[in-house]
Amino acid sequence: MLLNKLPGWESLLAKSEDYTSLHLDMLLHDPDRQKKLMFTNLEHFVMDFSKQRLSAEILDDLIELAKQAKVEKRIASLLSGEIVNQSENRAALHVALRAPSAEACFLEDKQYNKKIQKAFGKMEMLIKRIHALQWRGFTGKPIRNVVNIGVGGSDLGPLMTTYALDDFTAPDAKKINIHFASSIDGAQLAGLLPKLNPETTLFCVVSKTFTTIDTLSNANTAVTWLKTAGADEKVLKKQHFIGISAAKQKMTDWGIGESNQLQLWDWVGGRYSLWSTVGFSIALKIGMSGFRDFLAGAHAIDQHLSSTPIEKNIPVLLSLIDVWNCNFLTINAHAILPYDGRLKHFHAYLEQLEMESNGKSVSVENEDIDYRTCPILWGEVGPNAQHAFYQLLHQGTERVNSDFLVAIRRKAGNSDEERESFAEHHSLNLSNCLAQSRVLALGSTALSLDEQMKLSPHQQYAGSQPSTTILIDELTPFTLGGLIALYEHKVFISSVLWDINPFDQWGVELGKSIAKKIQPALEGKDLDYLDCSTSALIKQVHKVLNVDSEEKSR
Amino acid sequence: MKITVIGHSLEGITTASCLAEIGNKVYLTPMNEDEFQDDLFQHSSMQDGGLYSIFKTQIDETRLRISTRINVEDHNNDLYFVTTIPEDKESLSRLLDLLSSDKRCQGVVFTCSIPVGGLDKAIEKSHIPVAYIPEFIREGTAIEDFRNPHTLTIGCENNQLLKLIKELYKPFIHSHTHLQIMTIKEAEFSRFAISAMLATRVSFMNELANITELLNIDIEAIKRALGSDPRIGEQYLNPGIGFGGRQLASDLLQVTELEDTQADNIGLLNRVMTINERQKESLFRKVWRFFEGDIRGRTFAIWGGAFKPNSSKVNNAPILKLIDSFAFQDAILNIYDPGCSQELNEYIEQQQLGNQVAVCDNPYSALDGADALLIVTEWREFLMPDFDEIKLRLSEPLIFDGRNIYDPQRMKERGYRYFAIGRGERI
């Protein structure tokens, strides 16, 4: 049912009017507030919603709304493997990927877990060979560099995670460098290849369909590069490429041998695929046991989702806060602000997860939706963003909801002196994190009255920008796995409330097919059905390219 | 003199045997009682050229006795020789305390490999004079090296003890022997310096060999040119698949650690090690390239395994890396080595590779059905083998020679495809 048709919608809408103009300062002096709006029932995490512009009563009403939207039933459907992706008639079984065994898996059909474990077994074998420096390139030298070629879910998750978990690099992985290339323009490969030795570089081509043009064009460039170094095409495809895809035959046709193929399945969505063999580069980095910890952290959240009443169910609460901000307070921007340099790529990962899942305007039943769905989401490592877009958060005209993420413990440094120095960094970091959310909420009222009196208008902070703070014990493979799963499930619950299908992405298709039509026009073919703007741009391109070719022929 | 030699090692057995042979009364004991070996005749070092017979003679004639522990009270020694390194600094101090309780003892001579400055603290605390003679025997030629040393370096700062050592070694110092007297620390460092120099020469040659392969010229010609220059000399200029052995590698490692303590270290000796490790793989890489990476299930015959001819040891030897590399690719190996079968079998068992790697007792039977022959150690019996029989038994006439023991032109005439280090066919 559409969100605004739920019985609780109207009364919440009425109540929200009070909160639209209410300053957070009015709410943040109630000592009982934490008891109701700070949640510590999830191991390793503390969720503080008390800087959100709502009361415990509103939260109760939102929970009621979730019940009306049958959130509990829909969670059960997701976990039990029912078809939840209606437009593509598929289940979304990413949760099955992180179940450590068939017994722990939520699915009735135990075959899935068997297939998954078999694929992980093969992945482990390939990783073992690379770690032992026994994966050989065409001249027999051991592979030292692995380049992950993929785009979207085949890039963002592995990139974000391998970067975040660098502290947990497996001892054998220290000799292996992992790189990522995704962009269709080839710029990343162009920058990367000159730094690599073709004899010792392995490419991991990740594409669910093995037809993604972005990925295949990069893979073909890699083939050319290897060939130029003297490798025979048949040999190099055998020794320098691993394929990860659901399309076995297409990998084989492209030239990747069966022994170098890792299996993926239709029932794993791209943006949920880092838990599958697409997580190859993650496991290569932190070892298979680290990867299993990562999966276990996500599995712990799956269990929480499955067994916790929705009043205390963290992904449900996270989602309700989003819906409250978006649909009732009309705050349509959401900033992701990790106070941890290791989470540098986290916002890019979430941008895909949230906006590709919920950036939609028709319901599951194909009705037009007349309320807002996914907000615009962006982010940056907090301390760096403080020197960039925080100005807008503090003194701009846009209302923004923020997520502050920070690890309580941070171990870094090799010597006592270094550790002490890093500990100081971390305490600075923590205090900045807490200060920023406080100033966003309170504005100038964070100062004493005396101090406030001395401020001129350009020094004033309006405050009342809502935020959620997520404290993590420590960033480890286990807790990062958990954090990602929290956001995944939040996105799913929001989709239930908004009544949309989060598992398809029809909005990315049209651009791809139009690009195929424009390419011939760029190569000189006449196309009469283009709009005037695009035709004029193509003409400008031709003009420059014609000059280039004339110069070349001279 | 009455002497106790501590250490059931090649060094210990050789020193004890050679000192007994010239008339001394020698006890040979292990460092710790639990290291005592019942039957020293079964000791792996007994294979070392001639050691067995001289050892047996000295035992038979009772100048050499075996003792289960260091017996200070009864032995009444003039000198103690320490030929294996004590576990740590504390056990070194305890050892010196024990030895100094021997009232007759006039000094302790260390011949084991000791980190530079490793004796400093113990000497400071001990009342007994100490000397250091860097180990100068080599595996394979231990007796010959001891009886007829080219250089004898003695690190000793006590005149009385030095006099005694010189007298003891007089029968072994010949007109051509270079006798070097220096401080203990200088003696300690000089042995590392020699190891580092030798290793550097080998890696230098291997680096050149890789370049001559690119230039399509024969490294052996370059080696002759270098060796004939009196400033350079001929020793340790053989290109190959890298050096092994317990001593050279561990010595080099210690110097690289010292090297690392310099703030502006460029890491020459680290490079020497890296080149050597890479070189150990060179034969595998040639095979890999030849078969275009398709070696799964193929069989290869290997002649040689010991880290050098006339040795039974495989410590740090290229064969270990070759076994690992081929086994990882699911290839099958048949290895023949006249000296180190026992150690090879132990390694294979330890790595659980029994179903892929076999040790053969005949060089020709190792060849049956193999896709190629690889030469890994230049034992004399491999120098002029029956090439017709090799050809008959191999599935293809194909040889990868890691020690450059054959002539590429002659091999071609015999109908072989022949790949070697810095010579032969290029891949």
Image: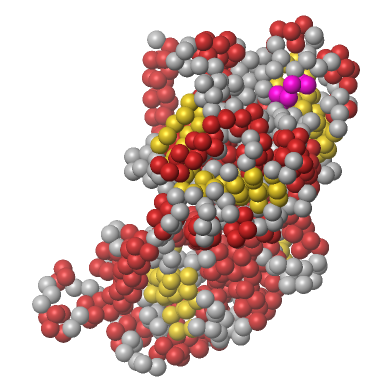
**Which residue does the image show at 22% across and 73% down from the upper left?**
A461
Residue A224 visible at all: no
Toward the viewer: B213 or A452?
B213
Horizontal and vertical percent for residue A504?
A: 62, 58
Q: Quadrant of residue A260?
A: top right
Q: Is residue A351 above or below residue B203?
A: below
Image quarter in which the C terminus of chain A is found: top left
Horizontal and vertical percent for residue A448?
A: 18, 83
Horizontal and vertical percent for residue B240?
A: 62, 24
**Which residue does the image show at 53% across and 14% down from the upper left?**
B227
Specify whether A349 is left or right of B22.
left
Residue A105 visible at all: yes
Specify whether A259 is left or right of A388.
right
**Which residue does the image show at 47% across and 29% down from the upper left?**
B179
Q: Is residue A471 magenta?
A: no
Horizontal and vertical percent for residue A544?
A: 38, 25
Q: Magenta span covers which residues?
A: B375-382
Image quarter in which the N terminus of chain A is found: bottom right
Q: Is residue A11 above or below residue A515?
A: below
Specify whether B403 is left or right of A29.
right
